Amino acid sequence: MDQYAAFAEVALAGATDNVVPARLQMGVSLGWHIIFSCFGVAFPAIVVFTEWRAHVRGNADLRNLARTWSKAMGVLFAAGAVSGTLLSFEMGILWPGLIERYGEVVGFPFVLEGFAFFIEAIFVGIYLFGWDRMSPRAHMLSALPMIVSGVAGAFFVIAANGWMNNPTGFSVDATGRVVDADPVGAMFGPSTWAQFTHMLIAAYMVTGFTVASVFAVAMLRGRRDRYHRSGLLIPLTAAAIATPFQFGVGDWIANVVAENQPVKLAAMEGHFETGTAVPLSLGGLYVDDELRWALEVPWGLSLLVTHDPNGEVVGLDSVPAEQRPPVNAVHLAYNAMVGIASALVLVALWLGWSWWRRRRIPRSDWFLRAVAVSGVAAVVAMEAGWLTTEIGRQPYIVYGLLRTADAVSPAPGLFLGFYAVVVIYVLLTVLTVVVLRRLAGSHDTPAPQEGSPERQEVFR
């Protein structure tokens, strides 16, 4: 019986232990949902582009590809809708201190995100059931609200997260109460556009590399017909175009972090002592206020942050130890994101070089193996970037103003919620994978009497 008593004691832990289960539950939920959010943002545009090419070229393979992808898009949207609904409840249940104190400031983008979700859900349904029931032009036009609302929904969520990193749009009176709330101004704080652009490009990278990786595996198994070549080339091209831009945006967001959250940047680099001519550190572990075993690029960090090789960079020593995030977690996640993104650039350059020289996909099995791995790699890089952002903000839930421990729910039993969420997401993952595998194994093929569709000038 002792083990059951111990389990009950942990599962029904009180307020003093609630930060751990609350952060675990939020982390699992967000880490799962963000993958499906990427597909909700980028996949519709890729599907509609493929349908447009099918109509313009009269290509049956492209049309079947777009139709099969639209079904996969519907499955992924449904899974993402479930996880997004859970998250909306968790914000209020797990973090009442945040909502109570800052709800009037940060609540507005969540409301707008809800409207964007409803619009996207309606037009996903219209697009899915509109095949062969609408003219090609009407069918493709019905997809535009779906694409726009998907991007808008991502913007509103990122705006709320950007506000948590750089809170603006309100004042505090003498009693510490929030006054003069400006919800619209709060949405457009210093971090919003950099974070949103970073996430938008990440969505195309994750979606493009992941979908291409499925077709790379099929081609390695011998299915090298036009259907599979197109299934690899279209999403991989989208990802290959997006990936180099991510480095420029990464420099932009690093400068925003350096200006507004210097301690987070110091944790990302494992940089302890404030100083000048600071090197850029690659890898290594942070031990006893020192980054060991790292590869250093002289003057690199000063040059990137201040655009001056002798510029000053704030270190972790600028704040007491209790105000610093867990350095190794942030530093390793940041390095993983940058390292994997660099490898994905090589895949993009490989495709670009082959297309420039021969106007075709590289035929090497090594290229297909690299693409096959790129899907998982892109997801890992995106998760690592998200961990960098969220753990780097700790110990604050609202940077510099509200500590995470002061916002968490005091109610007992949060571990039970965490266990329930894990079970739900395991089931959702299994069901989603099973449905997608069956869909991949029975993609749309034209009936013999259908032949090839006629070319259509869709938007003339």
Image: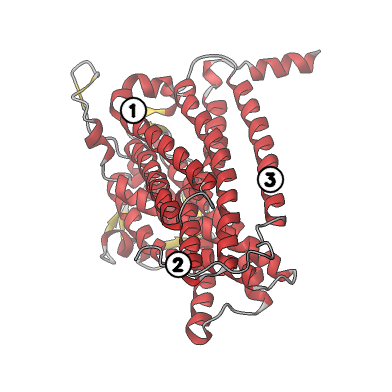
**Cα separation between marks 2 and 3:** 32 Å
Q: Position of residue 50 (x, y in %)?
A: 50, 63
Q: Which residue is mark 3?
A: 435
Q: Which residue is mark 1?
A: 107
Q: Is residue 178 above or below residue 155?
A: above
Along the viewing direction, whichever of 427 and 244 lies nearer the viewer: 427
Q: Is residue 10 above or below residue 36?
A: above
Q: Which residue is mark 2?
A: 456
Residue type at mark 2: give it.
Answer: Gln
| In front: label 2 or label 3 | 2
Q: Position of residue 83 (x, y in %)?
A: 55, 34
N-term-proximal mark, 1 vs 3: 1
Residue type at mark 3: give it.
Answer: Val
N-term-proximal mark, 2 vs 1: 1
Task: Determine the secondary structure under disc 1.
Answer: helix
Residue type at mark 1: give it.
Answer: Gly
Along the viewing direction, whichever of 317 and 248 lies nearer the viewer: 248
Task: Determine the secondary structure under disc 2.
Answer: loop
| In front: label 1 or label 3 | 3
